[in-house]
Amino acid sequence: MKEIKIVSYKARGGEEVPQLTIVFYLELPTIENSTLQIMSDLYKEEAEKIIDKMLKSLPGGLFDAIMIEMLDKKRSLLAVPFIEPKKE
């Protein structure tokens, strides 16, 4: 398993800083008759889990920098619509 260690924010006044370990271990499930909406919902749910934990564990500036790097690396993704085309 690959491991990355990064900084966390400093605890203040007895505040406990939650440690965060993210483990990617499951393969993307094959959903029979899956639609774009089903897959979009799955991705959103997984992303919400990660983001919620990151917000509680990372300094705000680091979280912002991660967000910027992710958007920069996937710039072309922003040009692709994530909706199914209307059938006429």
Image: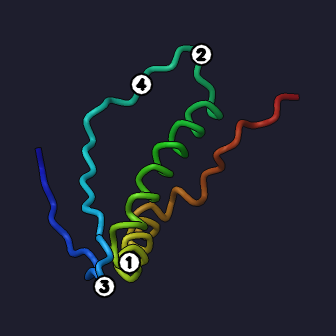
Task: Residue 83 in the image: state x and y as whole percent.
Answer: 70, 42
Q: Nearer the viewer, residue 50 or 31?
A: 50
Which quadrant of the rendered structure holds the N terminus?
top left
Query: On the image, numbered disc 3 is attached to which residue?
Result: 12
Tell me the amino acid under the disc marked 3. Arg
Task: Residue 73 in the image: state x and y as whole percent.
Answer: 39, 65
Q: What whole-number distance in Å separates the C-alpha atoms at marks 2 and 3?
A: 50 Å
**Which mark sits nearer the N-terminus, 3 or 4?**
3
Instruction: Please state which of the two labelled residues, at mark 2 or mark 3, is closer to the viewer.
Output: 3
Q: Residues within 10 Å of mark 2 (few under 14, many from 20)?
A: few
Query: On the image, numbered disc 2 is attached to which residue?
Result: 33
Quadrant of the image occupied by residue 4: bottom left
Q: Nearer the viewer, residue 68 or 24?
A: 24
Which quadrant of the rendered structure holds the C terminus?
top right
Q: Is residue 58 above or below residue 13?
A: above
Which residue appears at 26% of the width and 82% of the height?
10
Would residue 54 be found to the left or right of residue 24 on screen?
right
Q: Secondary structure beneath disc 4?
A: loop
Q: What whole-number distance in Å separates the C-alpha atoms at marks 1 and 4?
A: 30 Å
Q: How is the image coloured?
A: rainbow
Q: Is residue 40 above or below residue 74?
A: above
Query: Can you tell which mark lies on residue 65?
Result: 1
Query: Can you tell which mark lies on residue 29?
Result: 4
Q: Residues within 10 Å of mark 3 (few under 14, many from 20)?
A: few
Task: Residue 33 in the image: state x and y as whole percent.
Answer: 59, 16
Which residue appears at 43% of the width and 67% of the height?
55
Q: Secondary structure beneath disc 3?
A: loop
**Numbered circles on residues, count:** 4
Q: What whole-number distance in Å separates the C-alpha atoms at marks 1 and 2?
A: 37 Å
Tell me the amino acid under the disc marked 4. Pro
Tell me the amino acid under the disc marked 2. Asn
Which residue appears at 33% of the width and 67% of the height?
57
